[in-house]
């Protein structure tokens, strides 16, 4: 199987959200046939509505700076599917990705009706989904590469997500807010319970309790996570309980953080990702690192500072040009949109924004756009190249009060060209609403530089 065949096969399984089938049985059967690769290295498992990717990136960067061989599994990707699977900060090669896709595909074929002796004792209920397949590929690759520690971002929810087959060394829940209500429930309590599903009892009573780091200060979320910890025999620590910190932003919204706790002396560092919300993400990462230090992974505070300051996580308040300034951020749910709104109010002139907006049709578009559209003097509606994308005219119909500001384009690339025509050198082009739009634009910008 070559790379194009691998991509064609995986994409033929359908969009990872639209075709999502939550449940652990199929991924467990598949991994058992493949030799339980996820059990060959310790893992950190991260759930949450927003921030889990940033926390994963901070942790991986710090651990890599310590010389640990790191695995990192995140989703979705922006440009290339290989972005999801990294070892020591480097994406899996196209060749290795294609090879392991073939390995997993062959295993699935055997498990779905072969007379293979090993497969006869196992049975898949259905063909694994796109996300289940990529998760199995990641786990196999990390085992092959002999990682010391894998940092895993939950894909959707937690309790029934394919990543939740691991027995994590540390479990992290960043924040909990409204997103993917079709799958996780319409009430915050239901969503929080799904996220808290990554908190599970240890296999034996002799094992130490699972440490759980909670990055949310919401009392409802805290109560639900605490209850799940009690039921599972886990130990929860909330980052706001035992931390002293002071955070001050610079002119572009990058915060300098001074931090201390009962475990560590003061750390003074610059957070490389803009936005006040990244302060909590860094504090969550630091608390997890403190726990890892107690679990036999020596952690040097100087390397914590270095690792966090060197973290790169594209598509999250990412500034890619300055004349005019172009800022990219997915902002794909109401909580993320609020973070962007707050960032703009504090760090950008609000009436000098030309906004490019595209969203997935299964998202809370009216609520997301309702927070973002008042920030802009012009709004360019577009759609990403995916079957989930909402049509620009459908977005406009949801918020007719902004009719005078709308322009319509057929692609993010066309939207960027139009935005550059409409924006002065002092303006900001703000691209928001979907990581798929961000990915399409980053691909376009990269190809333009190469050309």
Image: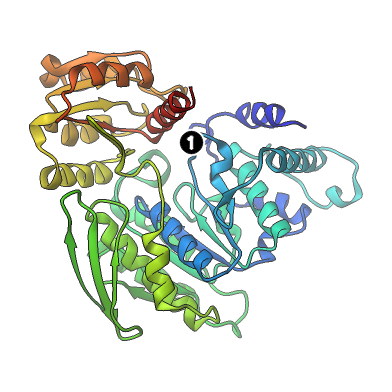
- At a point 29% along the width and 52% down the height, the residue shown is 188
Give the labeled residue for mark 1: 17
- At a point 35% along the width and 85% down the height, the residue shown is 263
| Left or right for 390, reference 342 | right
| Left or right for 286, reference 375 | right
Count residues near mark 1 (Cα–Cα under 10 Å), then give few for <14, some for 14-19, many for 20+: some
Q: Is residue 395 visible?
A: no
Q: Position of residue 398 (x, y in %)?
A: 21, 22
Exactly how many numbered labels are in the figure?
A: 1
Q: How is the image coloured?
A: rainbow
- At a point 34% along the width and 38% down the height, the residue shown is 330
Screen quadrant of the N terminus: top right
Asked if 59 appears above or below 275 in the picture, the reply is below
| Left or right for 140, reference 365 | right
Front residue of this view, candidates 190 and 299? 299
Q: Position of residue 233 (x, y in %)?
A: 47, 78
Q: Position of residue 295 (x, y in %)?
A: 52, 81
Q: Is residue 149 visible?
A: yes
- Dividing the picture into quadrants, the one containing residue 212 is bottom left
Asked if 82 appears above or below 39 in the picture, the reply is above
- At a point 54% along the width and 83% down the height, the residue shown is 208
SS for dot 1: loop
- Dividing the picture into quadrants, the one containing residue 404 is top left
Asked if 12 appears above or below 297 in the picture, the reply is above
Q: Position of residue 348 (x, y in %)?
A: 14, 41
- Dividing the picture into quadrants, the one containing residue 166 is bottom right
């Amino acid at each position: 199987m070559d790379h194009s065949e691998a991509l064609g096969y995986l994409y033929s399984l359908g969009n990872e959200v639209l075709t999502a089938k939550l449940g652990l049985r199929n991924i467990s059967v598949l991994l058992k046939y493949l030799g339980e690769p996820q059990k060959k290295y310790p893992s950190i498992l991260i759930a949450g509505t927003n921030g889990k990717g940033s926390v994963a990136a901070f942790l991986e960067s710090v651990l890599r700076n310590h010389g640990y061989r790191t695995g990192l599994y995140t989703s979705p990707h922006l440009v290339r599917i290989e972005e999801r699977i990294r070892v020591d900060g480097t994406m899996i090669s196209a060749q290795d990705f294609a090879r392991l896709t073939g390995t997993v595909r062959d295993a699935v074929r055997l498990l779905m009706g072969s007379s293979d002796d090993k497969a006869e004792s196992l049975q898949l209920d259905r063909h694994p989904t796109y996300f289940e397949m990529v998760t199995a590929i990641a786990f196999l690759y990390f085992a092959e590469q002999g990682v010391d520690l894998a940092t895993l971002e939950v894909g959707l929810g937690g309790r029934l997500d394919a990543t939740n087959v691991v027995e994590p060394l540390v479990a992290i829940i960043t924040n909990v807010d409204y997103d993917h209500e079709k799958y996780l429930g319409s009430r915050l309590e239901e969503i929080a319970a799904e996220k808290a599903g990554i908190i599970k009892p240890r296999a034996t009573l002799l094992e130490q309790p699972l440490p759980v780091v909670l990055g949310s200060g919401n009392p409802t979320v805290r109560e639900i996570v605490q209850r799940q910890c009690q039921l599972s025999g886990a130990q929860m620590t909330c980052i706001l309980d035992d931390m002293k910190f002071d955070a001050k932003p610079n002119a572009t919204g990058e915060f300098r953080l001074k931090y201390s706790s009962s475990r560590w002396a003061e750390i003074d560092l610059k957070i490389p990702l803009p936005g006040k919300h990244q302060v909590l993400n860094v504090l969550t990462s630091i608390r997890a690192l403190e726990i890892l230090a107690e679990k036999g992974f020596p952690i040097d505070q100087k390397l914590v500072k270095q690792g966090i300051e060197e973290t790169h996580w594209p598509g999250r308040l990412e500034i890619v040009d300055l004349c005019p300034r172009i800022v990219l951020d997915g902002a794909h749910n109401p909580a993320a949109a609020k973070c962007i709104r707050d960032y703009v109010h504090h760090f950008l002139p609000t009436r000098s924004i030309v906004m490019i907006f595209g969203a997935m049709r299964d998202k809370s578009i009216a609520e997301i756009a309702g927070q973002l559209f008042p920030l802009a003097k012009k709004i360019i509606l577009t759609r990403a190249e995916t079957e989930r994308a909402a049509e620009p005219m459908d977005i406009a119909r949801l918020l007719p009060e902004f009719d005078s500001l709308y322009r319509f384009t057929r692609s993010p690339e066309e939207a960027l060209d139009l935005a550059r025509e409409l924006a002065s050198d002092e303006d900001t082009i703000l691209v928001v609403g979907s990581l798929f739009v961000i990915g399409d634009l980053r691909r376009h910008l990269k190809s333009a530089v190469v050309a």
